[in-house]
Amino acid sequence: MKHGLLGEYRFFGKEGVMDFVRQAGCIQYDPIDVCGKNAELTLQSRIKGFSKSMLDELLYQDRLLVDYPDKNLAIVPVEDWPYFERYRKAARQHAERYPAMEALADQVRDSIQSNGEISSNELKLEGDFTWQSAIHWSGGSNASRSVLEQMYSTGELIIHHKKGTRKYYDFAQKYIPPHLLNAPEPLEDELQHYKWRVMRRIGAVGLLWNRASDAWLNIWGLKSEQRNEVFRQLLAEHRIAAVSVEQMKDKLYCRWEDLPLIEAVLQNPKPKPRCELIAPLDNLMWDRKLINELFGFDYTWEIYTPESKRKYGYYVLPLLYGERFIGRAEIVAERKAGRLVVKNVWFEDGVTLSKQMQKALKNSFERFAQFNGCQLAFSEKCLYDNAGFKTL
């Protein structure tokens, strides 16, 4: 219910995108586009009437969202920019280890001032340079790309727009309001910063445990000792609440303001189900061990698994029906042909497709095809290899 994935839609249009991203703190970005990029897939399952152009407008026209590392590559509300100043400062200090960087950075500045936003393939720098970025996971021997990413890490540049997977950069000062761009670090104390980050991650997922988790990725220095102290203080301050789940040993934790949601669920245990395709890096899926513990759904994103070792497929999306993961689907957008092909669907053991479920599933695929601007199509394998599914 917190994610807006159960019952009636809670989020609508561009305003709904902003409401959800502010609730979640960030959504993960990944450039791979098989049937939509991860951030787009995350939003299409929650936002009534969502289109890909909405996210593009909010990022590169309205400038209410900005690309910046949070949980790995991410999209965050622009008002959160000051809270990441410690990472930009670290990137500036990191750059001081590479004296050759500044001369190349001057060339970048001259190029942008003369020609406007630029990508690495259009930027020809004089000189060679190798590095490893302070806050960005990529780096390498391409001088143009390296310097642009470093200047992006320090906050001097932001992503002006993207064409496919290619990023175009421009000066941050042209797009981020001065009161945000020049704001000091709001939480200079490291523990206070950890508390802010942990609260965001709990809010992003809804319920989390105090265990090592992918949900804490890219919070520098947050080891078990620091995490335990953060949870202790947040509990004492009544900013989070401990939640006991039947048949689970570990306590889970939610934000204090989400307690009414738990009461609503207890009072109305059977809200109207919806069927949605869930993004591989969806906020809901950030801790896959927790998902397995709660829902008995074992999900691995097999995109980096060698083909011979894959159990399902290259780009497979979880299928959520109501409050249950009923299976997973491999879907490919054949954009030149204008077709969205459902290649295969694997249902979880014990799933029996009722007429209501089949109708919801078909509606979900039709909405997904519309989201991709394609006509819906099913492969022969998909139609006939899954018991009962051919009736769709």
Image: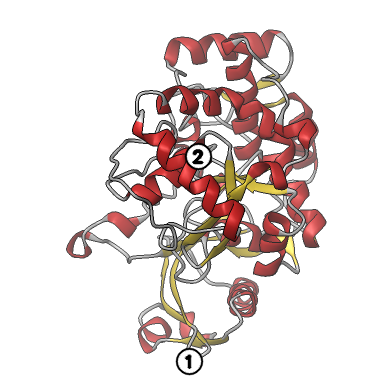
Question: Residue under circle 1?
Answer: 337
> Which residue occupies 72% across, 42% down?
176
Q: CA distance from mark 1 to mark 2?
A: 40 Å
Which kind of residue does numbered mark 1 sit on?
Answer: Ala
Vertical placement of 82 versus 61: above or below? above
Q: Where in the figure is residue 56, as x and y percent of width and height?
A: 66, 62
Residue found farthest to the bottom: 337
Q: Position of residue 173 (x, y in %)?
A: 69, 41
Residue shown at 43% from the left, 85% from the top:
383
Q: In this rendering, does residue 160 appear at all?
A: no
Is residue 19 shown left or right of residue 120? right
Most foreground residue, 249 or 122: 122
Looking at the picture, does residue 247 appear above or below residue 229?
A: below
Q: Position of residue 161 (x, y in %)?
A: 60, 59
Q: How many marks?
A: 2
Q: Quadrant of residue 182?
A: top right
Does residue 305 appear left or right of residue 238 in this picture? left
The residue beneath circle 2 is 151
Q: Quadrant of the C terminus?
A: bottom right
> Is residue 93 in sight in this rendering?
yes
Which residue sits at x=39%, y=51%?
Answer: 144
Q: Which is more foreground, mark 1 or mark 2?
A: 2
Specify which label sits upstream in the sequence, 1 or 2.
2
Counting other residues with Cα less than 10 Å from the Cα at mark 1, is it few (<14), some (14-19), or many (20 or more)?
few
Name the residue type under label 2: Met
| Residue found at the very far left of the displayed protein | 308
Quarter assignment of residue 260: top right
Judging depth in this view, the residue of 129 and 223 nearest the camera is 129
Q: Secondary structure at mark 1?
A: loop
Q: Nearer the viewer, residue 14 or 131?
A: 131
